[in-house]
Image: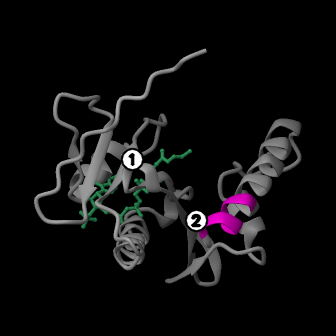
Amino acid sequence: MKIMNVTEENLDDFIKLCIPPGREKDELFFRGGEEKRRWALQMMKRHGSVAKIAYLNSRPAGLIQYVPQPDEKVVQITCIFVPERENLRKGIGRALLNVVIEVVKRLEPRPSALVTWVFRVPETFPQDEFFRRMGFREVEGGDTMLLYYPLQEGFVYRPERKEYIP
Ligand SMILES: CC(C)(COP(=O)(O)OP(=O)(O)OC[C@H]1O[C@@H](n2cnc3c(N)ncnc32)[C@H](O)[C@@H]1OP(=O)(O)O)[C@@H](O)C(=O)NCCC(=O)NCCS
């Protein structure tokens, strides 16, 4: 297995990993893919790479996407996905997460935690279970689907309350 940054060169691999086989030409998936391309290019300009792909026998097999949130001094994992059944449980998810942990530990200033909002996708191994097994914890008194992984000893994540003012 080889883990690579998502760059302009392999952006198509990144987009295709989230499109179910055979749906590449569906209007909605196509438009979604183009939106994702625009978003990724913008984020790469701002933050450098914001996603990594695991290649197994030179084929894209999984991805992780993460976005720095400097206002809270955390990095948010916005997606982790290993789509093909035959690639599951081979350590790809764990390897992707570990690479991101190593990368964000070297950021200056060093973020205090990785955070993630988990959501369940039917017929897949639940992300919240995966992240809990990888050492993520629940925010105290908060939403059980908001998990964090401290990058500094003793750090406790308390999300900022943000009000929506229309
Ligand atoms: C979560 C996910 C990324 C894990 O990927 P993976 O490569 O299969 O995970 P790993 O092989 O690295 O497993 C790491 C650990 O997670 C746990 N785990 C993963 N899959 C599991 C399963 N099916 N049953 C029980 N434990 C499991 C185990 O503790 C495992 O460690 P172990 O194999 O040493 O026991 C993958 O299941 C997935 O993509 N799920 C869907 C996630 C999703 O909804 N993403 C959003 C899509 S839009």
**Residue labelled with disc 1:** 116
Q: Disc 2 on helix, strand or loop?
A: loop
Would you say 61 lies left or right of 18 here? left
**C-alpha span from label 1 to label 2:** 14 Å
**Residue labelled with disc 2:** 50
Residue depicted at 40% across the width and 71% down the height: 104
Seen in the picture, residue 141 relative to 81 is either above or below; the reply is above
Q: Which residues, given as a range, are shown in magenta? A: 42-47
Q: Mark 2 packing: few (<14 Cα in 10 Å), some, or many (20+)?
A: many
Q: Is 46 within the magenta?
A: yes
Seen in the picture, residue 139 relative to 115 is either above or below; the reply is above
Amino acid type, callout 2 = Val
Q: Nearer the viewer, residue 146 or 164?
A: 164
Would you say 89 lies left or right of 1 here? left
Amino acid type, callout 1 = Thr
Q: Are marks 1 and 2 in contact (CB under 8 Å)?
A: no
**Residue 159 in picture, x, y percent from top left:** 31, 38
Q: Disc 1 on helix, strand or loop?
A: strand
Residue 130 appears in the rendering: yes
Residue depicted at 22% across the width and 38% down the height: 139
**Residue 130 in picture, x, y percent from top left:** 31, 52
Quadrant of residue 100 in the image?
bottom left
Residue depicted at 70% across the width and 75% down the height: 7
**Residue 74 in picture, x, y percent from top left:** 37, 55
Seen in the picture, residue 148 relative to 4 is either above or below; the reply is above
Predominant secondary structure, magenta span? helix
Quadrant of residue 128 in the image?
top left
Query: Where is the C terminus found, in terms of image quarters?
Result: top right
